[in-house]
Amino acid sequence: MQNPRNVRPGDGGWTRNLRGDTIRKSAPELEACGAIDEVNSLVGWACRVCSPPLQAKLRSIQQSLQHAASVAAGAEVDAHQLEEAIGILDCWNDGMESSLPPLTQFILPGGNEAAARLHVARSACRRAERSLVNYYQPEQDAVVPIIAVFNRLSSFLFTAARSENGQT
């Protein structure tokens, strides 16, 4: 027989969100939060082996991912902060892309260790974006800032992987 002191509410697949609602651990909002957490972990993992200038950007991205996770979990949305993250990602992406040769074919994920880790983070970022789309269910042509952040982040991670490969 199991000791009742060791049974926790989460053991049955339920948890509470920030609003205090009891929800299944398979709920779309938890799927989105978990996917964001995974992206944040993978960005941190990639950061360990990237060039110092990129490390600073990745650390900043991790802070933005923490904010995005709190928004997905039900915290009040700070649209300005999300829009600012989109602008920063666009700026960083454009700056890196301008120093790279134009793409003429599809590239295989991989290369050096930094690029390979960035590609893994990019793939997880795309999955997080799909989870957010499933959670928010936006209308066609609607812009949902948190989804836009992940769309731009995946582009940035792709360009960062190309850039890191060009350094070795």
Image (tube, rainbow, N blue to C red):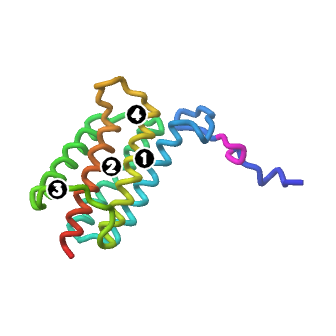
Dot in front, 3 or 1: 3
Mark closer to the chain start, 3 or 2 = 2
Task: Locate the N terminus and report the quarter of the image it occupies.
Answer: bottom right
Q: CA distance from mark 2 to mark 1?
A: 17 Å
Dot in front, 2 or 4: 2
Please identify the quarter of the rendering in which residue 108 is found: bottom left
Q: CA distance from mark 3 to mark 1?
A: 24 Å
Amino acid at circle 2: Ser
Mark closer to the chain start, 2 or 1 = 2
Amino acid at circle 4: Glu
Vertical placement of residue 165 versus 134, above or below: below
**Which one is in front, 162 or 59?**
162
Q: Dot 4: within a 10 Å radius of its alpha carbon, few (fewer than 14), some, or many (20 or more) residues?
A: few
Identify the residue position indicated by label 4 in the image.
Answer: 76
- Outermost residue to the bottom: 168
Element on which disc 3 rests: loop
Q: Which residues are magenta?
A: 10-14
Identify the residue position indicated by label 1 in the image.
Answer: 127
Amino acid at circle 3: Leu
Pinpoint residue 90: horizontal percent, then vertical percent: 18, 47
